[in-house]
Image (spheres, rainbow, N blue to C red):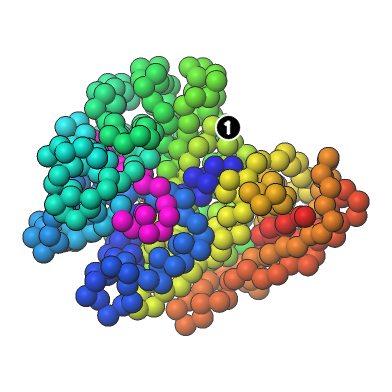
Amino acid sequence: MRPELQGQFAEHLGHGIYDGIWVGEGSSIPNIHGYRKDVVEALKAIKVPVIRWPGGCFADTYHWRDGIGPQDRRPVRVNTNWGGVEEPNSFGAHEFMNFAELVGAKAYLSANVGSGSPQEASDWLEYLTSDSRSSLASERRANGRDKAWRVDYVGVGNEAWGCGGNMRPGAYADLYRRYSAFLRSSGATPIVKVASGANADDLAWTDTLMAQAGDLIDAISLHFYTIPTGQWAHKGSATEFGEAEWIATLKATLKMDRLIRDHSAVMDKYDPGRRVGLSVDEWGVWLDAEPGSNGAFLYQQNSLRDAVTAAINLDIFQAHADRVRMANIAQMVNVLQAMILTDHEKMVRTPTYYAFDLYQVFQGAVALPVDVAAPDYRFGADSIPGLYASAGRDVAGAVDVALVNPDPSHPVHAEIRLAGLTAHAVRGRILTAPAMNAVNTFDRPDVVKPADFNGAVLKGDVLSVVLPAKAIVVLTLK
Ligand code: AHR
């Protein structure tokens, strides 16, 4: 399974970059060349495979030359998308590429298509990836980086139908064709070009894009956010919710599976061999901003509900890995469904972080078919499947099975037949908490945290598991 299914997204938005990742070398917060040490260490521990940057909507207002050269001489701009705050540009291309290297992640750049030009985007790539003596490569060296970086992915704009330029699909398809002629790496690795895809279920967008530019596209992005109430005006509280909101959230998130199937079916018309990938490069639970916070900063708490939602989405991506080649949760630090929250010198790993932690065994694993059945989980008029699963043979040769019980009150019994596999021992880790709205706070950072799990028994080739309520379990069989 491609590690990129566990990718991250980091935008210049609220405290996603500044304070969240970057504090600068002079900060009293412990840092590695300006990057928060605690955040770098936490991200390394979950093996972040790829980071998408600098946006989001921000990307189509961003001009890369603002973010190079001496930091104190960089221009200050206004972040027009996210609260009109000052953008100091002290975190620019060098800072991002070095950060990705430090964390061990691939770089996924979003090029400015909305207000930029093919020349600007092409220069950016040459500046970053050329080992030649071209003026742009020499400028990079003069700015402190001798060796060319590797850029693996480039997004050709972001939400071109919306904040990226209010385009119609045909107009964007033409623009994509034009940009794609100029976006190339000067390094050995070709860049995967990601076209700006549909807004949720806009299948006509995908159809037009595939018909008019599919031959030049490597992947199409898909953005879908889970909103518990289904209403942008009142999305729902991150912490004050009951079982009705719990099941509504999980039910809403299952739309991801349908969206992938539907867009993929449209793509199949033009690309039956599935050369073109889907890149779900923005997904996650979008909730009301924390009371008292700046609403434009999209800062929200993160509960066990978010972790369960994340695990179900990771299962969905893994099940569709023949089409979904990358997914990037929105967003990595302090924004939306974050891995990490910071407050000055304090830092906390969220429940979602720990869901990614449990699932990291699937990075690079060979997918194994897994078919599980359980009675539906019902509450009121709502019902959803009562069990979710993924399985794979990991890079160490062990078989891993992830199981999610969405029912917040009742355990579920699962029996999994290991057809053709022999195993002698099973060990596991579980993520759960006493309350479905349990959160980790700066004062109590370990409320939702993985623990050892001993509730699985191997009987011959059958794995029998009693899965506690509202739990994610990952079992490793040897
Ligand atoms: O992730 C927040 C915003 O959501 C992104 O900037 C944009 O692409 C999307 O609408």
Q: Is residue 172 above or below residue 134?
A: above
- Front position in the image: 142 or 68: 142
- The answer to whether residue 475 is seen in the rendering is yes
Q: Nearer the viewer, residue 427 or 376?
A: 427
Q: Nearer the viewer, residue 78 or 332?
A: 332
Q: Is residue 115 visible?
A: no
Q: Is residue 384 magenta?
A: no
The stretch in magenta equals 98-115
Residue at 73%, 67% in the rendered image = 453
- The percent coordinates of residue 258 (x first, y second) are 57, 36
Q: Is residue 183 left or right of residue 326?
A: left
* Quadrant containing the N terminus in the rendered view: top right
Q: Residue at x 31, y 77 (%)?
A: 29
- x, y (%) of residue 400? 70, 52
What amino acid type should be assigned to the residue bearing mark 1?
Asp
Q: For mark 1, does the 10 Å Cα neighbourhood hold few (<14), some (14 to 19), or many (20 or more) residues? A: some
The residue depicted at 42 percent of the width and 31 percent of the height is 219
Q: Quadrant of residue 411?
A: bottom right
Question: Residue 413: which quarter of the image?
Answer: bottom right
Expressed as whole percent of the image width and height from the top left, the position of residue 306 reads 54, 60
Q: Which residue is mark 1?
A: 322
In this image, 221 relative to 266: left or right? left
Closest to the observer, 110 or 173: 110
| Label 1, ligand 1: CB separation under 8 Å | no
Please count the marks in the image.
1
Residue furthest to the bottom: 443
Residue 130, x across and y down, in percent: 24, 39
For residue 211, side relative to residue 75 (left or right): right
| Rendered view: 351 above or below 152 | below
The residue sitting at 37% across, 54% down in the picture is 101
Q: Quadrant of the C terminus?
A: bottom right
